[in-house]
Image (tube, helix red, strand yellow):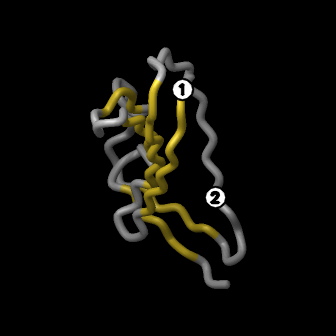
């Protein structure tokens, strides 16, 4: 119900990582991308939802993986993980 002000250390507000079955990183969305170096603040109004959508075409070998989504806010960091299988 209250507004939330998110603080980011630079222009990268989020990242997505894919880990293989032993925890090795096989993909990172932010790798090789350029981001501003200035601190950012973003306000989310009470009841508002922040949605981030990205696409990646990966050539993964069959097996189990974990996708990790990270909100890179310094004051409200959030991380969500989901497992998936490639057949």
Which residue is at the front of the view, 36 or 69? 69
42 vs 51, left or right, is left
52 vs 73, left or right, is right
| Disc ID at residue 29 | none
- The residue that appears at 41% across and 45% down in the rendered structure is 11
Query: Farthest residue in the bottom direction?
Result: 1
Q: Quadrant of the N terminus?
A: bottom right
Q: Residue 86: percent from the left, percent from the top? A: 54, 26
| Disc ID at residue 86 | 1
Crowdedness of circle 1 by 10 Å Cα count: few (<14), some, many (20+)? few
**Which residue position is annotated with label 2?**
50
- The residue that appears at 40% across and 54% down in the rendered structure is 72
Height in image: 23 above or below 7?
A: above
Q: Residue 23: percent from the left, percent from the top? A: 29, 39
Compute the Cα span from label 2 to label 1.
29 Å
Which residue is at the front of the view, 62 or 52? 62
């Amino acid at each position: 119900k209250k507004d939330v002000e998110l603080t980011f250390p630079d222009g990268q507000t989020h990242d997505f990582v894919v880990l293989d079955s032993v925890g090795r990183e096989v993909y990172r969305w932010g790798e090789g991308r350029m981001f501003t170096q200035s601190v950012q603040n973003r306000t989310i109004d009470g009841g508002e939802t922040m949605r981030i959508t990205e696409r990646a075409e990966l050539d993964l070998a069959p097996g189990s993986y974990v996708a990790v989504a990270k909100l890179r806010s310094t004051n409200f960091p959030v991380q969500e993980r989901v497992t998936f299988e490639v057949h």
